[in-house]
Image (cartoon, rainbow, N blue to C red):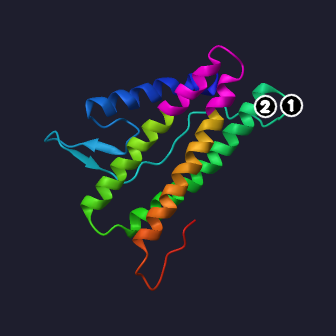
Amino acid sequence: MSAANRSAPAAMLAVLCLLLGIPSPASGATRRGDGATAAAGPPVITEHFKPLLACNPNTTVGMEGCGEHRVIAADSRLDADVRVISGLLSGGAARRDFSSAQAKWLAYRDADCASQSDVYEGGTEQPVAYVDCLAADDGARRADLKGFFALLTQDRQTLPAFP
């Protein structure tokens, strides 16, 4: 099964939860007994590439594998950025809002890439387009977070390292 097909149900669930206004399983939020949602911190990006394909730029499956490896590396950098920013936020509301935004961005990213890869639906290029989109969207999000980091640290004398 291709990466796009493996991730499509998770992306659909995340978008459905977003539309219904309930936390998705990937959102990092949990339900409390009173029905309210308690954020457990920013969500950690978890890909479902099983098995992780070997990288080989000479075959379509290998190109998908190369993309999967790029996505895993980009996710790791993005998760580190999110941890730094979360640590800079001053209050519980700011952290909850940031965690919520990150969860919604993840749902958007998955749906965006599923949509973009649908151009190649049924073809061998679809999973390659999907993982390439994931890596590109991760890069764009990282650029957004660098701007947020600059805003949060503009008046600070000592700065944490931004990964």
Would residue 66 be seen by someone viewing this image from the given angle?
Answer: yes
Q: Amino acid at mark 2?
A: Gly
In screen coordinates, is 109 left or right of 68?
Answer: left
Question: Is 94 contained in the magenta span?
Answer: no
Q: Is residue 127 above or below residue 27?
A: above
Q: Which residue is mark 2?
A: 62
Q: Residues within 10 Å of mark 1 (few under 14, many from 20)?
A: few
Q: Position of residue 64 (x, y in %)?
A: 72, 31
The residues bearing labels 1 and 2 have C-alpha atoms spaced at a distance of: 7 Å
Taking the view exactly as shown, the residue that stands out farthest to the right is 58
**Element class at badge 1:** loop
Would residue 50 be seen by someone viewing this image from the given angle?
Answer: no
Q: Amino acid at mark 1?
A: Asn
Taking the view exactly as shown, the residue that stands out farthest to the bottom is 157
**Element class at badge 2:** helix
Q: Circles 1 and 2: CB distance less than 8 Å? A: yes
Q: Position of residue 7 (x, y in %)?
A: 53, 28
Q: Which residue is mark 1?
A: 58
Q: Is residue 99 above or below residue 71?
A: below
Residue 14 sits in quarter: top left
Taking the view exactly as shown, the residue that stands out farthest to the left is 34
Region in magenta: 111-130
Taking depth in this image into account, of 124 and 112 the one nearest to the observer is 112
Identified at 70% across, 38% down, the residue is: 67
Magenta span: chief secondary structure: helix
Taking depth in this image into account, of 127 and 26 the one nearest to the observer is 127
